[in-house]
Image (cartoon, rainbow, N blue to C red):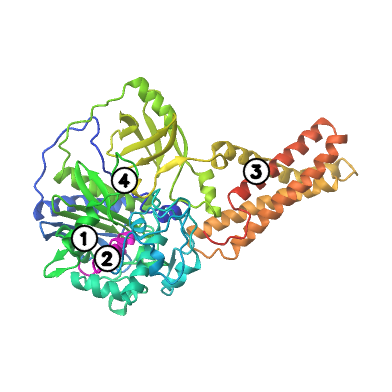
Amino acid sequence: MKQLFASLRALALAAMVGALPTANAQPRPATALTAVDAEAFIDGLMPSALRAARVPGAVVVVVKDGQPLLQKGYGLADWDRNIPVDPHKTLFRPGSVSKLFTWTAVMQLVEQGKLDLDADLNQYLDFTIPGRNGKALTLRHVMTHTTGFEETARDLLTYDTPGPDLGRVLKGYIPPYVYDPGSTPGYSNYATALAGYIVQRVSGKPFDDYMDQQVFGPLGMRQSTFRQPLPDALKSQMSQGYMTQDDKPKGFEVISMPPAGSMSSTGADMGRFMLAFLQQGRLGDSQVLKPETVKLMHGQLTRPLPGLSGIGLGFYEQNINGHRVLAHGGDTVLFHSDLLLFVDEGIGLYVSVNAAGHERQGAWLRDKLFEAFADRYLPDQRPATKPEVDEATARLHAQQMAGAYRNTRREDSTWLSVLQLLSPLKVQALEDGRLSIDLAGARSTYREVRPYLWEEEHGKRRLQAVVENGKVKHWGLEPFVFAFIFEPVPFMASPTVLALTGLAVVTLLVTALLWPVAAVLRRRHHVAVPPARQVTWVRGASVLALVALGLWGWVVALLESLGDASVLLPMAQLAMAVSAIGGLIAAGLHARQVLKLGDRWSQALAVAWVLAFAVLLIVALSHHLIGFNQNY
């Protein structure tokens, strides 16, 4: 489960640092960034980091002042065949970093007057995307991840399957809205794929052909493609992808919405892309975008929280050690990548690893590489932040923040909404006024430095909240704020409902377990009176409910392994419906009889059964464990 939803929310869990210095930070001198020093420094980090993370291989690229500074492979592209990573030949899958290339294509057509960022994008489609509350969807919403769409997960990634038909995928399921367009951040692969489909329709060329001819070609990226499966000429250059180096490779990952993440590329080619965007769209004699277009993409920011970093047109903003960075991360199940542009310093950094690694340390090590790189060559020279909030106010604000939250990149209309109930993000108020948050398996603490603005202790992230009438409306955390923010969970996803659900399940479990015990005791003590028919039905419904929960667990297991749940999902929905509805009816009939004639123990048990099935039914309906919707 952890791996699945980490991959679906890959960018959200990237955990790259960026914000203000910590209270104990001391200014340090910068080391000059030269080719010799960069190679020695990264050589000292990567081999041991790969071994510790159980990751076979990685590629690292550094560019500076219009030239490649370092292009180097580390480890192996194929563990079994002992093939090393070659930065000029080995293909990695940069995942959602691919989106930057899709945005480049969109902006080329904007330059040509063929696309309008603020027009209803239905004019570019051959099917209709409905608006919401009178607000039409635009390409600006798409590029700033403020479409308001629900997340989509089903068949997002498969292995060694034929390339998808983009139009058919997009028309097959249009995700419903959670928010009005333009109002709330919610990272969306579907929306990005929609932009790629618009590029295809407006240009009159298949998306893959357009990218080859108008983006990769002018940039000299001869070893890059969006095509799935890979062209024959590139197949032998593809790195294997692993969970860890101790596992067998899993095959070529096929992305069902290619413009959102299907690119394959070498490190050297990614370096050429970084150089172009650090040089106002120019690389050599090729001008892939006009300087004013690059400036627009980098400078016109949308900020979900006023005091935190935002997102431009496709590139999201970070503040690393006081330096402005434009970036994008990318995760498939197997490959984990990030691209950072220190735009004012003319420096670009790209890294990709070919395994998730032991306990997902593959994704973690790229972040640590960026942090170490910035601390060495671009250290924070700002003085430590002095808090402007007294301790009493900090304690009050921390108490206001304490609670359970869900993020705005989610599904409300499918069974995946149950994640809001099972795994909310919890914020704890500490006695001294600090906040404690567990995120992506790591705990961090924050101290308030300005009203409702917190700074991470022993870290570099910032957190800001919007509070109205003493209650938290929403809050955001860098660097995730461009992709989603957090809001309090509704009652049906609250810890109270989770506790009631747990009690209901325990009640049904005990009922099912004691059924054969009761039969044995009756036989042993020669009790001839069988249980009432309704009691037998209640017990049978309890067993079926546990079977339904087991089926749902199986559905989750299939999702984690990227298996096909098309048969199992409706079985789980049907079993839950029959057990919850049938159990409640049986328990109600039994209670009506027992409350008139039974003893107190029988009456209490009858009421417990009614409550257990009622809770199960309400939760199952609220979180779509009962229904006919096969999308998610």
Q: Which residue is mark 2?
A: 110
User: Of marks 3 and 2, which one's residue comes earlier in the chain?
Assistant: 2
Q: Which residue is mark 1?
A: 293
* Label 3 vs label 4, nearer the camera: 4
> From the viewer's perspective, is 605 left or right of 193?
right
**Real-space Cα distance between discs 2 and 1?**
9 Å
Which residue of the protein is positioned furthest toward the bottom in this rendering? Answer: 232
The answer to the question of whether label 3 and label 2 lie on touching residues, with beta carbons closer than 8 A, is: no
Q: Which mark is residue 505?
A: 3
Could you tell me which secondary element the residue under label 1 belongs to?
helix
The answer to the question of whether label 2 and label 1 lie on touching residues, with beta carbons closer than 8 A, is: yes
In terms of depth relative to the viewer, which is nearer, 343 or 300? Answer: 300
- The tally of labels here is 4
User: Of marks 1 and 4, which one's residue comes earlier in the chain?
Assistant: 1
User: Of marks 1 and 3, which one's residue comes earlier in the chain?
Assistant: 1
* Label 2 vs label 4, nearer the camera: 2
How many neighbours does mark 1 have within 10 angstroms: few (below 14), some (14-19), or many (20 or more)?
some
